Amino acid sequence: MERQYYLPHSPIEFHFRQSARDFVVDEIPLYPFSGEGEHLVLHVRKKNLSTWQMVDIFSNHLGIKSRDIGYAGLKDKNAQTKQYISVPKKFEPLLENFEHEGIKILEKQYHNNKIRIGHLKGNRFFIRLKKVNPTSAFKIQEALKAIKKNGMPNYFGFQRFGLDGENYKKGEAILAGTLKEKNRKLHQFYINSYQSYLFNSWLGKRIQISKLLEEFTPKELSSIVNLPEEELVSMKAQKHPLKLIHGDVMMHYPYGKLFHYESEEEVARFEKHDISISGLLSGKRATRAQGLAQSIESEFDTITSGIDGARRYGWIYPEEVEGEYKENEAWFELHFTLPKGCYATVLIEEIAKREIQTDEHQE
């Protein structure tokens, strides 16, 4: 997959490696916990452990099955992360003597329900970039200003695709019936990876078309991208770096109903961050784009059975974006908040205008 970046600057050199010191994540709950009920909610801090590994540690300590432990989202392994998990309240006494070098229980409270996947608002990140010279620091600050104003592409991060970046091929093979995976979690993970690959490919194509509109006239571009000249004229007039196409599936932002882009009024709403474009996670029963937008989306809609589809924001708006350059250490420190399911490493790659290489597989 060739990543398409929308920011106009040249690539920026700096050193970034996920670690507990330089990559910190704080989960933001979807709602306050009730303080009563049959579930014990633990606010935990983990270091250098995946969420699945942490859940296994708690399940072994409590003598319960992993599925009895609730969590809202998966957090990176090579990081310091804080998140909430839930266990049945009756096991609370067994936690009095819980100790693990990679896990600390920060707080306990009660709640009526088990925490389930997706029950979080988002995540707050702290990231430290190293070996940053003053010129690069200036370019990073300008990139952050652009992201504050215009948002950023909501690609799936490298974590979805495995160490070699090719997990999606296993998912494609599973759906084609040429590969069997007995492990239920891996089976689902590989298929989701294929969905993510198709989504990223669609998003890259849309950014590529938007960038080409800056370099070519609508008449010149019409034969290249197979869109009518009048549609390209409409797209070129849009101020946002990602150009909408009639028939796109839009979503109210940061949550809300789906609807199709038909009226030019929606362009202004997109620029104001009231709505955002969505991309397809190919599969059964998902809403599809219409008209001209569908002609592009259909290239990346190859899953017709075996898994349900969905829509995912194609463009997001990070909040509380802050950056500080520490020239003596040659560090640039970032703070920002992303909606659930979005990848901090994608923001770093958009700033860097290049893929970020990591030494180890992340969750």
Image (cartoon, rainbow, N blue to C red):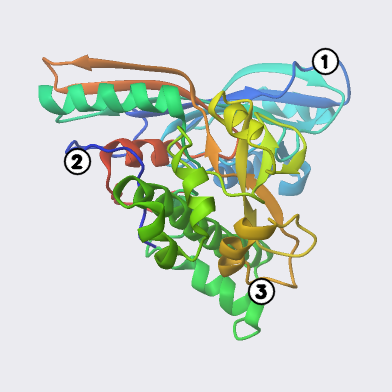
Q: Distance between the residues labelled 1 and 3?
A: 39 Å
Disc 1 crowd, CA 10 A, few/some/many (<14, 14-19, 20+): few
Task: Note whether 201 is above or below 329 in the view shown.
Answer: below
Q: Position of residue 115 (x, y in %)?
A: 76, 33
The three-letter amino acid code for the residue at tag 2 is: Ser
Residue that mark 1 sits on? 34
Mark 2 surroundings within 10 Å by alpha-carbon count, few (fewer than 14), some (14 through 19), many (20 or more)? few
N-terminal label among 1 and 2: 2
Residue 338 drawn at (x, y percent)? 52, 29
Q: At which x and y percent is residue 75? A: 53, 38
In the rendered image, which residue does mark 3 sit on?
182
The tag earlier along the polypeptide, 1 or 3, is: 1
Task: Give the residue pinned by disc 2.
Answer: 10
**Quadrant in which residue 117 is drawn:** top right
- Asked whether, in this view, residue 70 is left or right of residue 138, the answer is right
Disc 3 residue type (three-letter): Lys
Q: Is mark 2 on a helix, strand or loop?
A: loop
